[in-house]
Amino acid sequence: MSSTEQGTSSAAPAEPTTAPESAAAPEVPESFYYVHGKDKVVHKVSAGALQHSALIHGMISNLGYTEEQAKANPFPFENIDGDILQMVVDWCNQHKGKPTPPEDTNLPKQKEKLFDLVLAVNYLEIKELLTYCCKQVAMMVKGKSPEEIREIWMIPTDAEDEAAEKEAKKRAGKEAAGETAAAAGDAK
Amino acid sequence: MSSDIQKSIKTTEKLANDSIYDTNWCDMPSEIKAKCIGKMEFKERLSLRSTAKAERSLVDSQKIKFQKGVLMGELDNGDFEVSLDSENGNTVSFKTMKDRLELMKYIWKVGVFEELNVSISPLFGEEEAPAMKEKFIGNTSEISAKNVGFGHCDTDIILYILRNTKNGVESIEMNAFGNPHPFDDILAIPQVQNTKYWHIEYHNQTDALHKVAQVWIDNNSSIGSTFQLSIDTNVSFDDFKGHFTERIITTSTKRARISTNNPDHHILLERGWNPYGVYFRPQFFRLTVISADMKESDYDDNCKEWIRKLDPYFFNNWENNVDDDPVPVDDQEDFWEHLPVDDSDDSDDSDDDQMLNL
């Protein structure tokens, strides 16, 4: 695993410049966890930011990791592209401990990235971000005709679907026949 | 703690072994596609469901909320308009849809209406009309609507919509002007019996009041249940009182209060004031389930407010016509005093004055 701790600065919570003078109780130090995506780049994220993800929150809630243990055991999400995970981490940091706004205009507009983000966010169970993403996906086809939607989202026509299904069946049949013949050959 | 760590690592290993994402809409899991469809406006959903069978079936599985839905027109040639207001205030109208009935089938299936107004005119025996009506009605599955209103509407359609509307309808408004409604059939519908508010404008059957009161007694309807009626004929309380002789608690020229089987509930019938004079029609009535603890001093004397809900244009017309002064108080009092049905004491002497000073 790469030990590059990219995103550490953006992931770290904003440190107060001066300690409050009249602080009655000592502040509990914030705990951090580490995650990496397909690109193995490790992101340091505070437990507070990770609370947005029900999946990760559930995983870490009873761990009680020390800083060293957390660093040594980053959570590998190798099914998520590095840049997508970076977006997710950034969003969690930006919205740490804050009420989420009704709209989020900083989401990617490119189809591929947005779909990847939707899938990652759904996987990580980040409810609010998923809502924004789904809204963004819906916006992609606003005012579009069926033909335009088919083109934008590469939706095959029913005829194309049927042809593909027929082809798949044919292939499966051939494979099954091949396996039977091979099994018969083995038996001989 | 070490076992926790092991467990966590196992979980993350499992995550790591999951398939790599694809970025095509068609490869998205159905539940995510459904969430995205849930964020789409009605027009985009219509477009998406026209792309392919699989998309249609997915789009059809997602409900859509409408602030208001208006269906109006005539069924004799299938020429009716559909107008839908989405939650964010956008309106979409269909006036020249080729397959309106097919569209309606979809709307009934997925629409969740805050307000649904239907004014499909009665049929006049045109050749195609019965078939169109059958198709229109046949396409109605389970309707979700909180507030349902009917304008000048074919009574078969009224019955069918009410019977097919999910329970939980909060208000039902009807207009029977020139279009007598099958009252008993309507009252037999559970959604009507259970609604919190129901009114009929220009319903000319005087027995409606005691019939509704009887249903409320039988159903032990909740406090606040309200039925309002405007009627284009002179009506006394006699008919109502005659049906509930044993239950009468108090009566006056303007109100009759009866007990129910529930000792905590009473039913109050009120007559509204008509500024043109009490002989002027229509006459207005309100029936309400009230708490048995309600005092007469707590009665609502502002009948103008509830009449306005029943007939919004009635007072507007009067207020906009400065030449139409209300009938003098004396004449009105004379009427109240000489109503043949009012032989009981009116416990609230100020009632008439209060009502005339609306």
Image (tube, coloured by chain):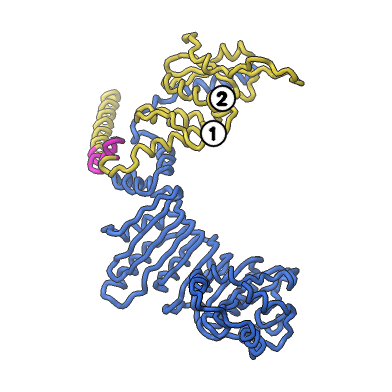
Q: Which quadrant holds residue B100? A: bottom left
Ranked by sequence position, the earlier of labels 2 and 1 is 2
Q: Is residue A59 visible?
A: yes
Q: Which residue is mark 1?
A: A100
**What separation in Å lies between label 2 and label 1 (alpha carbons)?**
14 Å
In the rendered image, residue B241 lying in the magenta stretch gets the answer no
Residue at 34% in and 48% down: B43
Task: Please name whichever residue, B237 or A146, is drawn nearer the observer in this view of the structure.
Answer: B237
Task: Please name whichever residue, B210 or B307, is drawn nearer the observer in this view of the structure.
Answer: B307
Does residue B154 appear left or right of residue A42 in this picture? left
Q: Which residue is mark 2?
A: A50
**Within-10-Å neighbours for mark 1: few <14, some 14–19, many 20+:** few
Residue at 50% in and 73% down: B314
Task: Please name whichever residue, A34 or B317, is drawn nearer the observer in this view of the structure.
Answer: B317
SS for dot 2: helix
The span shown in magenta is A149-163
Q: Which quadrant holds residue B156? A: bottom left
Does residue A64 appear left or right of residue B283 in this picture? right
Shade representing chain B: blue
Q: Nearer the viewer, mark 2 or mark 1?
A: 1
Magenta segment's dominant SS is: helix
SS for dot 1: loop
| Image quarter of the N terminus of chain B | top right
- As drawn, which residue projects farthest toward the front? B323
- Where does the image place residue A181, in percent across and percent down from the top left? 25, 28
